[in-house]
Image (spheres, helix red, strand yellow):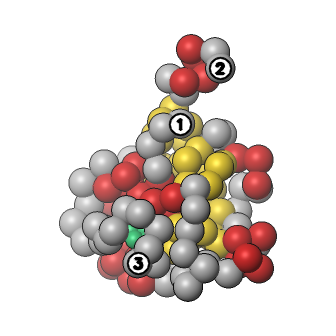
Amino acid sequence: MREEDINSKYNITIVDTDVTFKCARETHLLEGMRSLGQKGIPSGCHGGGCGICKIKILSGRNSYITKTMSRTHISEEEEKKGIVLACRVFPKGDIQLNVVGKIKRKILSGQKIWNFS
Ligand code: FES
């Protein structure tokens, strides 16, 4: 892998809020969201086990890679549709996503705080 690939940061857009943040290839999307400093982003397990960080990726399968996720929270069918756990997803290109599940209310309730662009 080329050094610029390793150091690449991608634009991640949460379509529900129009917030965009940068996320490095080696940083999972939940950590990227938390780096925005918004109160209320759930911490969860960060291991794909609790299901709190469910998102839907709109930008296509080639924009990210995933690590193992609990089938209790994400079925194979959901994963094929881009519904994944943010703590188990790493960008390899720019990503557009919607928040779903338990994380949605937290993020949308903090939307006013996030409108800093
Ligand atoms: S934080 Fe627990 S599944 Fe993502």
Considering the image in quadrants, where does the N terminus appear?
top right
Which disc is residue 64 wearing?
Answer: none
Name the quadrant where ligand 1 sits: bottom left
- Please give left or right for residue 96 compared with residue 31 in the image: right
- Which of these two is toward me, 93 or 47? 47
Q: Is residue 110 above or below residue 23?
A: below
Residue 41: give x, y in percent of width and height: 30, 68
Q: Is residue 63 above or below residue 41?
A: above
Q: What type is the residue that disc 1 sits on?
A: Arg
Look at 77% across and 70% down and name the residue there. 80
Asked if the residue at tag 1 contacts the one at tag 3, i.e. Cβ–Cβ closer than 8 Å, the answer is no
Which disc is residue 25 wearing?
Answer: 1
Residue 7: give x, y in percent of width and height: 50, 23
Q: Residues within 10 Å of mark 1 (few under 14, many from 20)?
A: many
Name the element at disc 1: loop
Look at 58% across and 62% down and name the residue there. 68
Q: Is residue 22 above or below residue 5?
A: below
Residue 105: give x, y in percent of width and height: 39, 83
Name the element at disc 3: loop
Which residue carries the number 2 mark? 1
Asked if the residue at tag 3 contacts the one at tag 2, i.e. Cβ–Cβ closer than 8 Å, the answer is no
Look at 61% across and 23% down and name the residue there. 5
- Which of these two is toward me, 12 or 91? 91
Q: Can residue 35 be seen?
A: yes
Give the spatial CA distance, label 3 vs label 1: 23 Å
Asked if the residue at tag 1 contacts the one at tag 2, i.e. Cβ–Cβ closer than 8 Å, the answer is no
Q: Residues within 10 Å of mark 3 (few under 14, many from 20)?
A: some
- Which of these two is toward me, 99 or 112? 99
Q: Is mark 3 within 8 Å of ligand 1?
A: yes
In this rendering, the label closer to the viewer, 2 or 1? 2
Which of disc 1 and disc 3 is earlier in sequence?
1
Which residue carries the number 3 mark? 50
